[in-house]
Image (cartoon, rainbow, N blue to C red):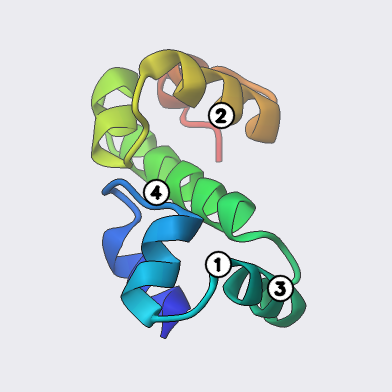
Amino acid sequence: EVLQYIGEHYSEELSLDILAQNFFVSKYHLSHEFSKSVGTSIYRYILLKRLLSARQLLLGGVTPSEAALRCGFKDYTSFFRAFKGEYGISPRACCLTGNK
C-alpha cells in the first residue's frame, strides 16, 4: 500500500512523517519495514521515483525546470544535483541528446 501511495503522490510533498501519519504507524517502524521489504530507504525510493519520472518527461520534450516542478522537487538546484548524481549528466544534456 505504501508503494502504491508513493506512486500516486510522488509529485506532492512527501516524507516519512507524512507516510507514517497516513498509514497510522510510527515512522521508525515504517522506515524499518520499508527498508527490509524494498531494500532501500523511503527517501531514496521517492527520490528515484521522481528522477525516473523527470527523465521520462525530459525525453518527451519537457524543459528541465518544468520537469523538476512536476516531479515534486522544491527547487531546480536540488533537482539538478540529484539528476546529475544519479545519471552522470545534467538534465539539459539529457533532453538535448535524448540520452536514455
At mark 4, the secondary structure is helix
| Residue 83: assigned label | 2
At mark 2, the secondary structure is helix
Q: Position of residue 4 (x, y in %)?
A: 38, 78
| Along the line of sight, the residue nearer the viewer: 60 or 50 | 50
Please name the amino acid that badge 3 sits on.
Answer: His
Task: Look at the picture and state if 78 lies above or below 35.
Answer: above
Specify the quadrant that holds the C terminus.
Answer: top right
| Along the line of sight, the residue nearer the viewer: 3 or 66 | 3
How far separated are the C-alphas under marks 2 and 1?
Answer: 27 Å
The residue wearing badge 3 is 32
Q: Going by the picture, which residue comes out furthest to the bottom? A: 1
The residue wearing badge 1 is 27
Q: Earlier in the sequence, mark 2 or mark 1?
A: 1
Q: Position of residue 47 (x, y in %)?
A: 53, 46
Left/right placement of residue 39 relative to residue 49 reads: right
How far separated are the C-alphas under marks 1 and 3?
Answer: 8 Å
At mark 1, the secondary structure is helix
Please name the amino acid that badge 2 sits on.
Answer: Phe
